[in-house]
Image (spheres, rainbow, N blue to C red):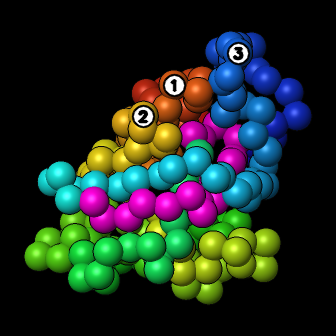
């Protein structure tokens, strides 16, 4: 059972400075928040998507994941790829690769749970596999091989996925 649910920051958490957010202040279960900043995703210098109509999912201990409307995606850049996963909050995820590749660079929820219906079909990208930007700042990927959180200078942790965080 989780001890930390966003209702109190644990002793080991970094204190956020002005204009920063602590991942330990995010709720569990997670919340879905619209984000009007310019979000861009590029691969090999090619712009894949740019939007000001993103959503952030905020969950205790994890950097935000950004979900982007599929209609803003450049045509013919993503193909469905193997694999599925299940999130207790959002439902079953499907994965997407760049055309000509089999490595997943994005995922989406075609039939999300009721609380996450606004992101039905929206895409979230792994910032460690493609170039992601929030308001011009290059995003750093969440540590570990599975998670896809977006770390910017506004985010303080430590975050899930770093060494020694397996019990979170």
> Residue 18 got which mark?
3
Q: Which of the two discs, 3 and 2, labels the residue nearer the N terminus?
A: 3
139 or 134: which is nearer to us?
134
Q: Main secondary structure of the magenta part?
A: strand
Is 112 situated above or below 104?
below
Badge 3 or badge 1: first in the primary sequence:
3
Q: Position of residue 156 (x, y in %)?
A: 60, 24
- Residue 60 is situated, as x and y percent measured from the top left of the image, at 70, 41
From where the camera sits, is residue 101 visible? yes
Position of residue 136 relative to residue 47, above or below, is above
- What is the crowding at mark 3: few (fewer than 14 residues within 10 Å), some, or many (at least 20)? few
Q: Is residue 51 magenta?
A: yes
Point out the stretch of residues depicted in magenta.
47-63
The image quarter containing residue 10 is top right
Task: Report the Cα–Cα distance between label 2 and label 1.
Answer: 8 Å
Residue picked out by circle 2: 137
Asked if disc 2 and disc 1 are in contact, CB closer than 8 Å, the reply is yes
Tell me which residue sits at (69%, 47%) in the image: 59
Question: At 38% from the left edge and 64% from the top edge, which residue is drawn?
Answer: 49
Say few, some or many: other residues with alpha carbon within 10 Å of mark 1 (under 14 / 14 to 19 / 20 or more).
few
Q: Residue at x 67, y 33 (%)?
A: 23
In the foreground, 2 or 138: 138
Q: Secondary structure at mark 3?
A: loop
Give the residue number, with chain letter if any, for mark 1.
Answer: 153
Asked whether 95 falls inside the magenta stretch, the response is no
Residue 8, label in figure: none
75 vs 15: above or below: below
Query: Observer-nearest residue: 118 or 157?
Result: 118
Please name the residue shown 32% across and 74% down the image: 74
């Amino acid at each position: 059972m989780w001890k930390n649910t966003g209702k109190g920051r644990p002793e080991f958490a970094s204190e956020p400075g002005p204009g920063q957010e602590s991942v330990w202040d995010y709720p569990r279960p997670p919340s879905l928040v619209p984000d009007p900043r310019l979000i861009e995703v590029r691969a090999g210098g090619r712009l894949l998507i740019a939007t000001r109509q993103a959503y952030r999912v905020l969950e205790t201990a994890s950097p935000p994941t950004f979900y982007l409307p599929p209609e803003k995606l450049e045509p013919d850049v993503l193909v469905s790829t193997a694999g599925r996963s299940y999130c207790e909050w959002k439902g079953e995820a499907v994965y997407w690769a760049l055309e000509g590749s089999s490595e997943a660079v994005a995922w989406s929820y075609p039939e999300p749970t009721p609380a996450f219906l606004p992101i039905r079909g929206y895409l979230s990208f792994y910032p460690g596999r493609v170039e992601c930007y929030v308001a011009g700042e290059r995003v750093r990927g969440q540590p570990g091989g599975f998670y896809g959180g977006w770390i910017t200078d506004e985010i303080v942790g430590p975050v899930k996925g770093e060494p020694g965080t397996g019990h979170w």
